[in-house]
Amino acid sequence: MSKYENGYMGKIQYWTGKLNDEVMNTKIPNLENIDRIHRKLDYFIQRQWDLKNQPIFDSQQEFTAID
């Protein structure tokens, strides 16, 4: 069972806020912090994308081979 079975939107919102804070609310934004936050945000966006676009398999579905 996934720790984030209900999705990653909370993490995406959190890291978006952190990115906004670093870029907009800092006199001299730190590029290293921006990059670190961006990588975390990118990770959770990808995880959310994968979660929402994973194929749904019916355990009762029958498959047949085609020659």
Image: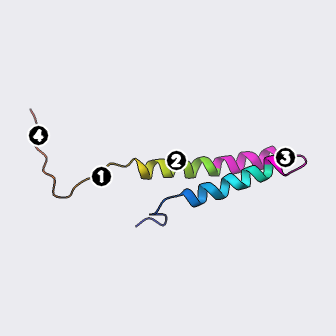
The residue where tag 1 is placed is 56
Residue 2 falls in image quadrant: bottom left
Q: Give the Cα distance between marks 4 and 2.
A: 33 Å
Tell me which label, 1 or 3, sits earlier in the chain.
3
Task: Residue 65: give its label.
Answer: 4
Task: Residue 46: give its label.
Answer: 2
Of the two numbered discs 4 and 1 in the rendering, the one whose residue sits closer to the viewer:
1
Q: Can you say whether 51 is above or below 64 in the image?
A: below
Farthest residue to the top: give it.
Answer: 67
Residue 10: where, in percent of width, then height? 58, 60
Tell me which label, 1 or 2, sits earlier in the chain.
2
Tell me which label, 4 or 2, sits earlier in the chain.
2
Q: Is residue 27 left or right of residue 38?
A: right
Q: Residues within 10 Å of mark 3 (few under 14, many from 20)?
A: some
Task: Residue 23: give its label.
Answer: none
Q: Residues within 10 Å of mark 2 (few under 14, many from 20)?
A: few
Task: Residue 29: give its label.
Answer: 3
Q: Could you say whether the residue bearing mark 1 is in a helix, strand or loop?
A: loop
User: Is the Cβ of the residue at disc 1 closer than 8 Å to that at disc 3?
Assistant: no
